[in-house]
Structure formats: C-alpha cells, structure tokens
C-alpha cells in the first residue's frame, strides 16, 4: 500500500487516509460507494485528491465531476462532466445506451430517457471503461450538483456492488444532497485535534510567536483551511469576532483580500464565480488575474488560462461582496459568450433581467422544451415558471404557467409545443385546473415536494385577488397543497400554507377545515374539531361520494377514527376493482392498511397491500405504493421478519430522500424502530424513533409522531435512558394528545407506567388497560401488558405478573408477533410458570386446513397443484399460506418443512 505521507502533507489525517485507502483497495475489486461528509474547510477535497492519487497508483482510472454553487440549475451538467472523458468507450456500449446518454447531455436528439434507462447506460459506460482498468468516480461538492445529475448518481451509487467501480462523493455537513439518507457508508471528517492543528500551523507559519499561534489556534478551532488562511489577513484581529463561526471568519478573511483587489480584477472574479465552468472570460488579460493569484484566491491554469477558485468559500465571498447591479451586468456579459439558444444563455439573461422581458421569457421557454426532451421535467418546470415571471403579457404568463404544470405531470402525453395550447383557453381558471392535475400527479408519483409547493402556492396567490367565493377548483388546489404539506412534513411548508389560505379571506368548506385541523396538525389543532369530525363520520353511510369518503377517512387517520369509515372505504375499493374511481380506491387501500396495522388485522394488511400495490404499479402511484410498503414493513417488524423490513425501508428511503418526502422517511424510520425493538436493539430503536419525535416529542408538523410515542418511550426505558424517557412522557402529557382518542389515552397512561416510580406505576398501567376500547389496538395493548408484567415480576408481585404476561402472550401468538411472544415466554419462565414450546402453541393455532395446505406446500407442490387436490383456487391457497407463515415464525416457503418438523406428530404427505 502507498505511503500516504508522501502525497502532499496532510497533517493529522492518518486515520482518514487509511480508511479511504481501504475503501479504494476494496472498491477496485468489489465496487462500492462512500460518502465523505465534513464542514467547509475541513480538508475534504485534499483527502479526495490523495485518494484519487492512490487509486491512480493502483492502476485505476479516475473520473471526476463536481458541483458548482452557481451552476446547480443546469440540467445534467454533472453527467456531462463525468462522461466527457469517455468518448472512446461510448462506441463499446449498445446503441440504446449511447442514445440515452447523448440525449441527456444534449448531444443527440431523441425521446427523453427515464432515470432507470440513463442509470443503466452510465453503468454500462463505466463498466466498459472498467474492462481495461478499475474505475474510481470522484464527485466533489455534491450539495451543488444539479438535481438531475445528483439523482442519477445517487441511483448509480447503490448499484456498484461487484463491478470493480468505486464512487466517492463529498458533501458539506448540513447542506443536504441526494446521497444522504440513501443508505451509503459515510466517513465524517472532523476538525484536527489540538496537536495536529498546532503542527500544521507551525509548519506553514514557523515565524509566529507563541501568543500569535495560540490566538490563531483558538480562532481556527481545528479547521485546516482556517489554520492556513487566518494568519495571512491584514491588520489586527477584530475582538468582536470571538464567537464567530469558522466559516464566517474565513469569508471575512477572503472578503478583505477581495476588497483590496483592483476593480477590473474583482470584475473578472465575479464573472468566473457566476459562470461556474472554470473557463476564463475571453476578454480578460492574464495580467488582470495576477493580483487574485497573489492573494491566494484563485489558481490560473498556465495552458488553458482557466480559473479555479482555491476554495468554494472564496467563490461565495466574491458573489456576496458584489452589488445587484454588478451581478446583473456580469450575467449579461456571460450570456453573450453562449450560443443564442443555449440553456446557460437563457439562465444568465434571466438573472440579468430587472423586469419583465418577452424575449428572455421566450428563450427560457425554448430552453425548457429542450430540458424536458433531455429527461429533466423538474428543470423544465423551473425554467417555465421563471419564464412566466418574466412575461409582460398576462396571457403569456398564464400559458407558460399552465404548460409548466403539464410538463411536471406529463398528463397530456408528449406535449412538446406550448403554442399548441390555445391562448383563449388560458387565464386563471385553466391555469388552476392544470396546476391541480399536474400537482396531484406529481404528489402521487413521488415528485419533488418543494417544486410542487411553489407551483401550488403561486396559483393560490394569483387566485387570491379576484376570488370572492370558495369554488371547486379552489378546493382542489387547497386539498393537494394540504397533502403536499403533510408529505413534506416540515414546519415551513405549513406556515406557507396557512399564510396563503388565510390570505384568501374566505371560509373553507367543512372537509377542508377538518383535514387541516386533524390531519395536518392534529397535536395542535384537532381537539376542537373532533365533535364535527365524529358527526361527519356518523353520516358517511348516507353519501355515495367516493372522494368525500376518502377525505373524511384522511381527516380521521391520526385521531384513530378510521374504523368508522371502513365500510365506506371498502365500497370505494370495490368501485375501483370494477374499473371505477381508481385513484380513490388506491387511497382507500392505503388508509385501510394504516388502520389494519394499528388494529391488529395483520393478515388482512398483507392481503390488501399486495392487491393495492398491483394498482399503484399499474397506475404509477409510487407515493401511495410506498404507504402500502410501510404497512407491509410494520407487519414484518412485528413478526420479526428483519430482511423484509430492511428491504422495504431501504427502498422507501432510496426514492423519498432525493424528493424530500419527509413523511415517507418517517414511515421507514418507524418500521426500523419497531424491528430493532423486537430484536433487543434498544438504542438503535430509540434513535430511529427520536428522528421522528423531534425537535419536540410531539412536533406539530409531524403527525406521524402520534404513531411512534409508545415505541419512543419503550425504547428509551429499555436503553436505560430513563431521564429522557421521563422527559418524553412529560411532553406527551403536556401535549394533551390523550384527549384525541382512546388509543392515545392508553399509550399516554402506558408510557407513564413505564417511567413511574415503584409506588405509582400500578395505577398508571391499570388506567391504560382500563381505557374504553383499549383492546381495539391489540399490539400496543399487549406491549403495555408485557411492560406491566415485567415491572410486577421485578416488584415480586408474581401472580399479578403472570396474569398480565399470559394475556399479552395470547395476543402476541394470535398476531404472530414472534419476538414479543418469545420475550413474554422468557418472563413467564422467570416467574416460575412453565410455558408451552412455541411449536406446540403454534400447532394449536393452525386450523386443520392450514396444516394440510402447509404439509402439501412443504412437499413441494405449487399453489395450483394444492388447489387442484383440495378443490380450492390458487389464490385461496396463497391466502392460507400467508396466515400460516407468521404462525410458524417463518417468512418463506423454503422454511416450511423445517418449521413443520418441530410440530407435534401429524399425518404427513
């Protein structure tokens, strides 16, 4: 292995260099991806360079791409940078792959490739390169990579196993990227320790006195860039900066150097910063750049004369110090260097504009069409919305805004010419209708939350001025906006929503009010709306409106009243099965799935989820399909099927993270928390639950927390975090969520019992179990009984403990909740009560027909063959096996024979 000390002088980074070397050595054989995370100036790029040098020394080919802060909106810029050096390898891949890459980077005309096709094409291209030598892909500054490229790279990173291709991504802490939450390994780069920081400082500045060195070390806080740059600033330190963050100190340091430059030099630096391509503006004399080089702000390539900023903070400081007029003038000059129809020219002219301008709006519209044709509809939407903003004529504004919605939704097929839309059909009504259709499609297909949010808010605000009554189109806009806010699950989205709706000055329809109160922010707003909700649910049977039934069930979801809507929801499902309201049917499937998880109908959940996923796949409702996958994952978590939980949760995170769908990320975390709880990994369970129940235990903008409260407190108690557990319980009590439903009342009292002192825990547990209708939520009810029994046994109240533990065990066995049943049995044995072996108990739970079907399946017969022998349909056979597997504690057909062999004797096939 290479001596890393010889690659430059990276002081204090032996551990990080060793880990990166190990990653490269492994990836060059097996493939893989790693994310390097750290604060600005901590040395990520230097470590990346050292890693690339090591890979090259091993004979690997190193390919680079990087995000640039002021180029993040140019579609597929990162993909273009990656494939540019691979022109020779393009001829070695299939023509369809060449076409997909060519269309994406704008070199070829053709149908827009979808993400999977483009990812496959890139993987084929990299694999072709890897035939000659291993390949390492290095992507710096992921937080500024264009969204289209970042999404593709994120998918690609998860598919590099066994390829001989490695990928290293680098992202600044807290900036966010597609790669975060994607399940990749991470290497966090922290500050240098005190000894290493002192060594680096004195190597670079040996002339510093002890006092000066001590001051710099204190200011730099172990940040290598700060250690190198802070001692070079002119003038004495500002005593008012004592607590200023390191990044801000560095920007101030760079700012002083920039302000000291000649005017012409600053102007050229601004052009370079806003251009982002690394090319020197043609009119610049190299002499004008020398002051910036001497100030250690940039490097100039002596051959190409291209400009490279020494650090992204330098680029940011150049832009921050410029005036609005200077930036517009720079964008105007930059636009002139690009072809008349290029996306970059259009974007620069848009930034240069100080008011509406039809010529620029038309350029943006044309660029949007090309961007859409390259497979980036989100980028096209952004361009068209900007074009609408710059349109002087209201008709053109409405036409472009409407077309943006159609592009985002793709509801009209391959609509490639906006002039095909009759302007006479434009105006606010058409724009609003198109926005509803487009946004609803984007929401349900798992589109980008923030893009949808901006689109709908824009339409809502435009309607606010002339609107005098709350009409149907307005209701649809608000409903989709409500759904998007819920799925984004961020406080700012809700704040924007409330401001926009309040700005209408109108009284919303009852259903809108109920959804806003009980679905969006139940912990804060639901209580006063419960009587009206109960009244509406009581009358649901008298209405045949499927949309109304679904929306009422949505309002009932977090306050545990879906049971009152079940009959209506099943009618909606039947209507969808017969070819009716498919979208409503899919939503009904998801609501029934959520309800089934809580109410303990786990076999029913598995059946309806399978059927519902067939609908979501056929009709491209990815988001709602994710909700059904969550229901599957929760049943698997309760029954101890770890592999299924991991596969489903990872899939949810993989597509929800890049689109910032916080609700789905919370669902995945919930399933992981329950899975970890069942397997005794209590600290892991606590961290997953805490990721939902934060920044407060019951955050108003995260109603999912109402499903997680019991998991959070139980995990904290079992992880020996009693102070945290008691704080959570106090927060739950303070929030008064117990008043929202009997389930939440039971959980509040049960959580209180888990954390109460020895003289009061009985009263709390008794109150929980005495909650009216508590047994309607059997899994939570049995877990409270288990916790109660455990405390009673430890308090030497053995007979009482046995009573609670036996009742809990019966429920767990009925649900097939194997991990919790095993824990119950262990507690009962510790109390001196013999328990039947699980196999004997399981045998009693199997019906004669289930046992017969299981025996035949274990003998190797297919569902069709079993059905023919027993005169049953294959679907009925499958349903019996679905119920049998969890009772046997298995998850696959292959495990049947071994599981049946442990049961009492029974005639075998």
Image: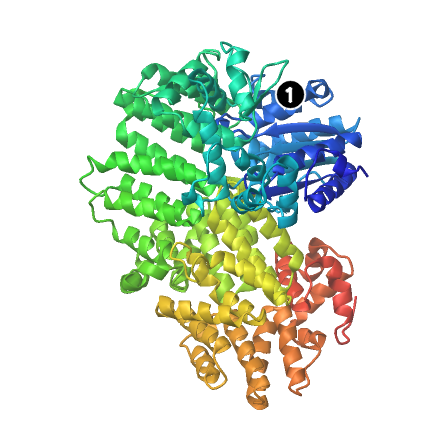
At a point 53% along the width and 31% down the height, the residue shown is 312
Q: Is residue 576 above or below residue 830?
A: above
> In this rendering, would 796 be left or right of 730?
right
Q: Residue at x 61, y 36 (%)?
A: 207
Tell me which corner region of the image, top left, top right, bottom left or bottom right, holds residue 296.
top right
Indicate the position of residue 587 as horizontal and vertical percent values.
44, 50
Q: Is residue 608 visible?
A: no
Q: State the residue in front, 547 or 153.
A: 153
- Local crowd at mark 1 within 10 Å, few (<14), some, or many (≥20)? few
Describe the element under mark 1 as helix, strand or loop: helix
The quarter of the picture where the N terminus appears is top right
Camera-side residue of 698 and 111: 698
The percent coordinates of residue 399 (x first, y second) are: 33, 24
Q: Position of residue 854 (x, y in %)?
A: 71, 64
Q: Which residue is situated farthest in the right direction here?
A: 1
Chosen colour scheme: rainbow
Q: Is residue 160 above or below residue 651?
A: above
Residue 793 figure quarter: bottom right
Q: Position of residue 674 (x, y in %)?
A: 57, 63
Quadrant of the rendered image containing residue 792: bottom right
Q: Is residue 726 in view from this perspective?
A: yes
Rendered view: 16 above or below 799: above
Residue 291 in the figure: left or right of residue 741: right
Locate the C terminus and report the quarter of the image it occupies: bottom right
The residue that label 1 is drawn on is 84
In the depicted view, which residue is nearer to us: 783 or 2?
A: 2
Q: Is residue 27 left or right of residue 478?
A: right
* Residue found at x 65% / y 48%: 195
């Amino acid at each position: 292995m290479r001596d890393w000390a010889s690659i430059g002088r990276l002081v204090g980074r032996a551990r990080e260099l060793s880990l990166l070397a190990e990653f490269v050595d492994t990836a060059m054989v097996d493939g893989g991806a790693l994310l390097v995370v750290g604060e600005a100036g901590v040395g990520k790029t230097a470590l990346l360079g050292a890693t690339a040098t090591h890979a090259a020394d091993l004979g690997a080919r190193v390919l680079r791409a990087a995000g640039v802060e002021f180029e993040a909106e140019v579609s597929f810029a990162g993909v273009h940078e990656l494939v540019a050096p691979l022109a020779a390898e393009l001829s070695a891949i299939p023509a369809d792959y060449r076409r997909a890459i060519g269309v994406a980077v704008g070199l070829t005309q053709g149908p827009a490739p979808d993400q999977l096709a483009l990812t496959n094409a890139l993987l084929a291209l990299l694999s072709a390169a890897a035939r000659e030598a291993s390949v390492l892909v290095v992507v710096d500054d992921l937080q500024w990579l264009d969204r289209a490229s970042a999404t593709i790279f994120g998918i690609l990173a998860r598919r590099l196993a066994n390829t001989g291709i490695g990928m290293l991504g680098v992202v600044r802490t807290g900036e966010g990227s597609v790669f975060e939450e994607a399940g990749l390994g991470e290497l966090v780069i922290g500050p240098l320790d005190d000894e290493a920081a002192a060594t680096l400082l004195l190597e670079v500045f040996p002339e510093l006195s002890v006092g000066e060195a001590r001051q710099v070390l204190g200011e730099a806080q172990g940040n290598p860039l700060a250690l190198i740059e802070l001692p070079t600033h002119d003038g004495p330190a500002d005593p008012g900066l004592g607590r200023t963050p390191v990044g801000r100190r560095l920007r101030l340091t760079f700012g002083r150097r920039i302000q000291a430059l000649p005017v012409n030099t600053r102007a050229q630096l601004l052009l370079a910063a806003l251009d982002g391509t690394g090319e020197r503006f043609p009119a610049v004399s190299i002499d004008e750049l020398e002051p910036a080089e001497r100030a250690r702000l940039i490097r100039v390539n002596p051959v190409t004369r291209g400009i490279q900023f020494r650090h992204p903070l330098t680029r940011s400081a150049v832009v921050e110090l410029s005036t609005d007029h200077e930036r517009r003038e720079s964008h105007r000059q930059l636009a002139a260097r690009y072809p008349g129809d290029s996306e970059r020219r259009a974007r620069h002219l848009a930034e240069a504009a100080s008011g509406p301008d039809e010529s620029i709006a038309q350029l943006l519209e044309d660029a949007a069409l090309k961007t859409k044709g390259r497979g980036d509809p989100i980028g096209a939407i952004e361009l068209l919305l900007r074009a609408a903003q710059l349109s002087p004529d209201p008709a053109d504004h409405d036409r472009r805004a409407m077309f943006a919605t159609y592009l985002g939704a793709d509801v009209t097929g391959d609509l490639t010419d906006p002039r095909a839309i009759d302007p006479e059909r434009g105006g606010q009504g058409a724009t609003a209708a198109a926005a509803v259709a487009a946004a609803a499609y984007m929401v349900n297909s798992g589109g980008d939350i923030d893009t949808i949010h901006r689109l709908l808010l824009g339409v809502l605000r435009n309607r606010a001025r002339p609107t005098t009554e709350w009409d149907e189109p307005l209701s649809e806009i608000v409903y989709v906006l409500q759904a998007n806010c819920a799925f984004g699950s961020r406080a700012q989205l809700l704040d924007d929503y409330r401001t926009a709706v309040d700005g209408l000055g109108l009284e919303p329809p009852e259903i809108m009010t109920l959804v806003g109160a009980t679905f969006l922010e139940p912990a804060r707003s639901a209580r006063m709306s419960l009587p009206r909700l109960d009244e509406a649910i009581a009358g649901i049977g008298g209405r045949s409106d499927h949309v109304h039934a679904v929306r009422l069930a949505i309002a009932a979801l977090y306050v545990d009243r879906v049971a009152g809507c079940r009959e209506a929801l099943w009618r909606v499902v039947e209507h969808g099965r017969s070819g009716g309201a498919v979208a409503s049917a899919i939503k009904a499937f998801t609501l029934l799935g959520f309800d089934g998880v809580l109410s303990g109908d786990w076999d029913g959940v598995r059946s309806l989820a399978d059927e519902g996923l067939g609908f979501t796949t056929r009709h491209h409702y990815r988001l709602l399909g994710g909700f059904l996958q969550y229901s599957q994952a929760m049943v698997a978590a309760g029954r101890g099927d770890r592999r299924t939980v991991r596969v489903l949760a990872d899939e949810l995170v993989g597509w929800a993270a890049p689109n910032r769908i916080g609700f789905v990320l919370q669902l995945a975390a919930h399933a992981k928390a329950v899975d970890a709880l069942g397997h005794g990994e209590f600290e892991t369970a606590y961290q997953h639950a805490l990721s939902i129940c934060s920044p407060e235990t019951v955050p108003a903008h995260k109603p999912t927390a109402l499903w997680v409260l019991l998991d959070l407190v139980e995990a904290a108690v079992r992880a020996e975090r009693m102070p945290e557990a008691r704080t959570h319980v106090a927060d739950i009590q303070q929030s008064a969520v117990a008043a929202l439903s009997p389930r939440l009342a039971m959980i509040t009292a049960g959580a209180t019992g888990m954390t109460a002192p020895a003289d009061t825990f009985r009263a709390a547990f008794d109150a929980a179990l005495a909650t009216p209708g508590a047994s309607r939520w059997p899994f939570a009810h049995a877990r409270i009984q288990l916790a109660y029994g455990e405390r009673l046994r430890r308090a030497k109240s053995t007979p009482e403990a046995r009573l609670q533990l036996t009742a809990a065990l019966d429920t767990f066995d009925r649900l097939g909740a194997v991990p919790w049943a095993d824990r119950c049995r262990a507690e009962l044995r510790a109390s001196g009560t013999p328990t039947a072996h699980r196999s004997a108990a399981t045998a009693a739970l199997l019906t004669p027909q289930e046992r017969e079907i299981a025996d035949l399946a274990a003998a190797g017969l297919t569902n069709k063959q079993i059905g023919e022998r027993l005169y049953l349909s294959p679907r009925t056979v499958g349903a019996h096996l679905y119920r049998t597997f969890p009772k046997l504690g298995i998850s696959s057909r292959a495990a049947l024979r071994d599981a049946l062999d442990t049961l009492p004797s029974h005639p075998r096939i």
